[in-house]
Image (cartoon, rainbow, N blue to C red):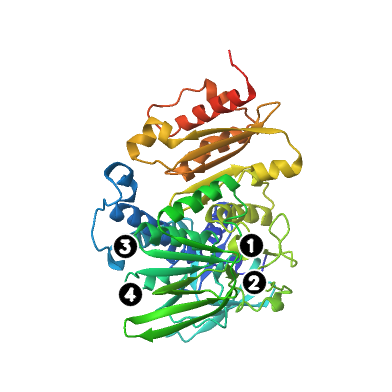
C-alpha cells in the first residue's frame, strides 16, 4: 500500500459508497470519497429514494387519502394541491439528509473530493474538477470502489424535454400538476409515481408490454395492487408496446401522444418514461482499468463484489438487481470488509423488499410461486387489516398480511404484506425467518393491542386452521 495516497477511494456518495467509505474508515484506513456533484448522497437522497418517498408522504397527508376510509372519498386536507405544496416537505427532508450524510463522513475522517473521476489505470483516477476550478489532478489508491449508481434509461427516439416528457430523475421539476399522466413502464418506480398521482385524483394510464405487474412479488399482492390502482381510476394498459411518443399543441394547450403497437393511442398532459435504469459508468473509462460494462452500464462482480480487476470493487445499483438502498448499504459494508481482509457475513436470502406504492408493499422470503416451482409443500395464513382493530382505527380497508409456511414442519418460509406500514411490519417476520422459526411463535406471542402486529397472530391462527391443527 506504500506509495498510494489512499488505502481506498470510493467513487460515488450514494448509500453503497457512504457505507463502504465509513466501514473502511472504521478499520483505520485512509479513505477518500469522490462525488461529481457539490452535494453528497447521490441519486438516493437528491432525486430518487428520499425525494420520492417524501413526496409520497406529502401526497398521503395533503390528499387526506389515509382518512378516506373513515371520512369518505371526498375528504382532503387541502384543496387544489400544487407541486410547490408537495416540494415544500421534500426540499426540507433532502437538505436534512445531505447534512446528516456529510456529517457522518466527516466525523469518520473520510476525505470528500468533488469532481468527475475516470480511470488512468487500476490504481489511478483522473479527477476533473467542477467548472470554475481550473486544476485537475490524479488520485491513487490501493483499492478502488465503484459506487456510481444509475441514471434513468433514455430512449433516443423519445423527445424528452423536461416540460411534457419526463424521467424519474427530473419529474419533480414539473412546473404544475397535470390533469392526466401517462406512465410508460410498470416497474417499481413507475408504479410508485403512478399510484401517487392517482391518489391525488389525476387520471393515470400505465403502459407496459408485460402482462402482469411486478413479476417478482407474490401474485396475490400484485393483483391487489392492480385492483386498488383501478379503484383510484388508473387505467392499466398491460401487454401493450409503445411504438412512438410525440408532443403536440392545440387550442387547449400542450399534450403528449403515445402510439401503441396495437394501434391504440394514449393522450395525456404529461408522460413519465420509466423503463429501467442504466449504470452511470459511461465517463469512467473502465477499459483503462481492464473492465467493461454491459449494455445497461452495469459491472459484473463476484460474491465478494470484486470485479475482474482484483483491487477494484463495485457495489450498489451499478451492479444490478435488486438495486435497493438497503441492499446497496450492505454491499458497501461487505465489500469494504473483504477488501481489507476482515470477515463479514450477511443473509442475502432474507433481504426485505419495500415498494412504496399506494398501498405500500413489502415482502421477505419465498413466494407461493417460488415454492411451487421448488416442489415444497406449503400452506398459507392470512390476516386482513379490516378485521384488526388497529386497521379500523387508521381507516385502512385494503391491508393484507400473508404468511407462507411449510405444511409439515410449520417453519415460516415467507411474509408478504400490502397496506399501511408494510415496510415496517415485515421485519417481525424477517426476524423469525432468520432463526428458522415456526408460525407457532406468532400464536404463542402476545402483541400489543391494538396494533397491526396482531396480524401475525391472526394469520398464524388462520394457517393452523387450514392445517386442522390445534395448539395446546
- Quarter of the rendering occupied by the N terminus: bottom right
Going 60% across and 71% down the picture, which residue do you hit? 241
Q: Which residue is mark 1?
A: 320
Residue 329, horizontal then vertical, whole percent: 55, 54
The quarter of the picture where the C terminus appears is top right
The foreground one among 438 and 4 is 438
Which type of secondary structure does the marked residue at label 4 adopt?
A: loop
Mark with earlier residue (1, 4): 4
Residue 214 lies in quadrant: bottom right
Tell me the crowding category of disc 1: few under 14, some 14 to 19, or many 20 or more residues within 10 angstroms, Cα based.
some
At horizontal 39% and vertical 36% (from top left) the residue drawn is 391
- What residue is drawn where x is 43% and y is 36%? 385
Distance from Cα at disc 3 to Cα at disc 1: 30 Å
| Badge 3 or badge 1: first in the primary sequence | 3
| Location of mark 2 (residue) | 296
Please name whichever residue, 113 or 289, is drawn nearer the observer in this view of the structure: 289
Instruction: Name the quadrant containing residue 381.
Output: top right
Q: Between marks 4 and 3, how big is the CA–CA gap?
A: 12 Å
Decide: marks 1, 2 in contact (CB < 8 A)? Answer: yes
Residue where numbered disc 3 is placed:
86
Residue that numbered label 4 is attached to: 175
Distance between mark 1 and mark 2 Cα atoms: 9 Å
385 vs 166: above or below: above
Q: Secondary structure at mark 2?
A: loop
Which is nearer the N-term, disc 1 or disc 2? 2
C-alpha gap between disc 2 and disc 4: 30 Å
Amino acid at each position: 500500500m506504500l506509495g498510494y495516497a489512499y488505502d481506498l477511494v470510493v467513487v460515488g456518495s450514494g448509500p453503497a459508497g457512504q457505507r463502504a467509505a465509513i466501514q473502511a474508515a472504521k478499520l483505520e484506513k485512509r479513505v477518500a470519497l469522490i462525488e461529481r456533484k457539490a452535494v453528497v448522497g447521490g441519486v438516493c437522497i437528491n432525486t430518487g429514494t428520499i425525494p420520492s418517498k417524501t413526496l409520497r408522504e406529502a401526497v398521503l397527508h395533503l390528499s387526506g387519502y389515509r382518512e378516506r376510509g373513515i371520512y369518505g372519498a371526498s375528504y382532503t386536507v387541502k384543496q387544489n394541491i400544487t407541486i410547490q405544496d408537495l416540494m415544500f416537505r421534500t426540499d426540507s427532508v433532502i437538505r436534512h439528509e445531505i447534512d446528516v450524510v456529510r456529517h457522518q463522513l466527516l466525523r469518520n475522517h473520510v476525505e470528500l473530493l468533488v469532481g468527475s473521476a475516470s480511470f488512468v489505470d487500476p490504481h489511478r483516477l483522473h479527477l476533473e474538477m467542477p467548472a470554475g476550478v481550473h486544476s485537475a489532478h490524479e488520485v491513487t489508491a490501493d483499492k478502488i470502489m465503484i459506487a456510481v449508481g444509475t441514471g434513468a434509461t433514455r430512449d433516443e427516439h423519445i423527445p424528452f424535454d423536461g416540460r411534457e416528457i419526463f424521467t424519474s430523475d427530473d419529474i419533480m421539476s414539473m412546473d404544475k400538476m397535470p390533469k392526466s399522466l401517462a406512465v410508460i413502464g410498470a416497474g417499481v418506480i413507475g408504479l410508485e409515481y403512478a399510484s401517487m398521482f392517482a391518489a391525488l385524483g389525476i387520471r393515470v394510464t400505465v403502459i407496459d408490454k408485460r402482462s402482469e405487474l411486478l413479476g417478482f412479488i407474490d401474485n396475490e399482492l400484485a393483483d391487489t395492487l392492480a385492483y386498488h390502482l383501478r379503484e383510484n381510476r388508473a387505467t392499466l394498459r398491460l401487454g401493450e408496446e409503445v411504438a412512438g411518443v410525440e408532443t403536440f399543441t392545440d387550442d387547449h394547450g400542450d399534450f403528449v401522444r403515445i402510439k401503441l403497437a396495437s394501434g391504440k393511442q394514449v393522450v395525456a398532459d404529461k408522460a413519465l418514461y420509466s423503463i429501467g435504469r442504466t449504470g452511470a459508468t459511461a465517463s469512467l473509462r473502465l477499459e483503462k482499468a481492464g473492465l467493461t460494462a454491459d449494455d445497461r452500464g452495469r459491472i459484473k462482480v463476484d460474491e465478494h463484489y470484486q470485479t475482474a480487476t482484483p483491487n477494484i470493487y463495485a457495489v450498489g445499483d451499478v451492479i444490478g438487481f435488486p438495486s435497493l438502498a438497503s441492499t446497496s448499504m450492505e454491499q458497501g459494508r461487505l465489500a469494504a470488509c473483504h477488501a481489507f481482509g476482515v470477515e463479514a457475513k450477511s443473509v442475502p436470502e432474507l433481504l426485505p423488499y419495500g415498494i412504496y406504492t399506494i398501498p405500500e408493499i413489502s415482502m421477505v422470503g419465498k413466494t407461493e410461486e417460488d415454492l411451487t416451482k421448488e416442489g415444497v409443500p406449503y400452506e398459507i395464513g392470512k390476516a386482513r387489516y379490516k378485521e384488526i382493530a388497529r386497521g379500523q382505527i387508521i381507516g385502512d380497508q385494503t391491508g393484507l398480511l400473508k404468511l407462507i409456511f411449510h405444511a409439515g414442519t410449520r417453519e415460516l418460509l415467507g411474509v408478504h404484506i400490502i397496506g399501511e406500514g408494510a415496510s415496517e411490519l415485515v421485519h417481525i417476520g424477517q426476524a423469525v425467518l432468520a432463526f428458522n422459526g415456526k408460525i407457532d411463535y406468532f400464536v404463542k406471542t402476545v402483541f400489543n393491542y391494538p396494533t397491526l402486529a396482531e396480524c401475525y397472530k391472526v394469520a398464524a391462527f388462520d394457517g393452523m386452521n387450514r392445517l386442522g391443527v390445534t395448539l395446546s
